[in-house]
Amino acid sequence: MKFRFLLWVMGLLMARASRRNPAFQQQLRGKDLVFQMQTLDGKVARHFKVSGERIRSSSGLHPDPAFAIAFKDAAYGFATLQAANKQLAFMQGIQDKSIQIKGNPALVIWFQGLMKYLKPRKKKT
């Protein structure tokens, strides 16, 4: 349940950033694709549609995503996406086959670059 909620929140944050953040919009420029995050069994899945410098998300599997990131189970997906060092967690998961990348791996790197725009802003003191 936590993994499903986390994917939903990621969709909201990316949709908001695609409307409000010019740097995020720049990263989306020229992209027209669908990607998804899911469990290996496909029971928990959310796909994200990039079009016109905007991102929308929907629950469920997409028939033909440009890439998919599949986690061995929901608990592992939640832990990986919440890890302090996400890049290290992803690399370890890929090495031990707990995370499978389907589709274009270059787009996965692009996606990981998008994640830096979703971090909460630090308050000025």
Image (cartoon, rainbow, N blue to C red):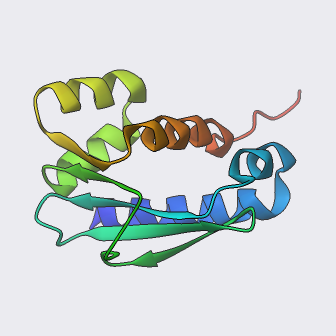
Viewer can see residue 84:
no
Quarter holding the C terminus is top right
Q: Residue at x 19, y 51 (%)?
A: 75
Closer-to-camera residue (97/4): 97
**Residue 39 vs residue 31: left or right?**
left
Closer-to-camera residue (62/15): 62
> What is the count of numbered marks?
0
* Image-quadrant location for residue 35: bottom left
Closer-to-camera residue (27/60): 27
Q: Residue at x 60, y 42 (%)?
A: 114
**Residue 34 vs residue 99: left or right?**
right
* Percent position of residue 85, x then y: 41, 23
* Percent position of residue 79, x then y: 28, 41
Q: Residue at x 74, y 47 (%)?
A: 24
Viewer can see residue 109:
yes
* Percent position of residue 73, x then y: 14, 54
* Image-quadrant location for residue 123: top right
Q: Is residue 110 above or below residue 86?
A: below
**Residue 112 vs residue 64: left or right?**
right
* Image-quadrant location for residue 61: bottom left
* Percent position of residue 89, x then y: 30, 27
Q: Is residue 2 above or below residue 98?
A: below
Q: Is residue 122 above or below residue 118?
A: above
Quarter holding the N terminus is bottom left
Q: Is residue 83 above or below residue 28?
A: above
Q: Residue at x 38, y 69 (%)?
A: 46
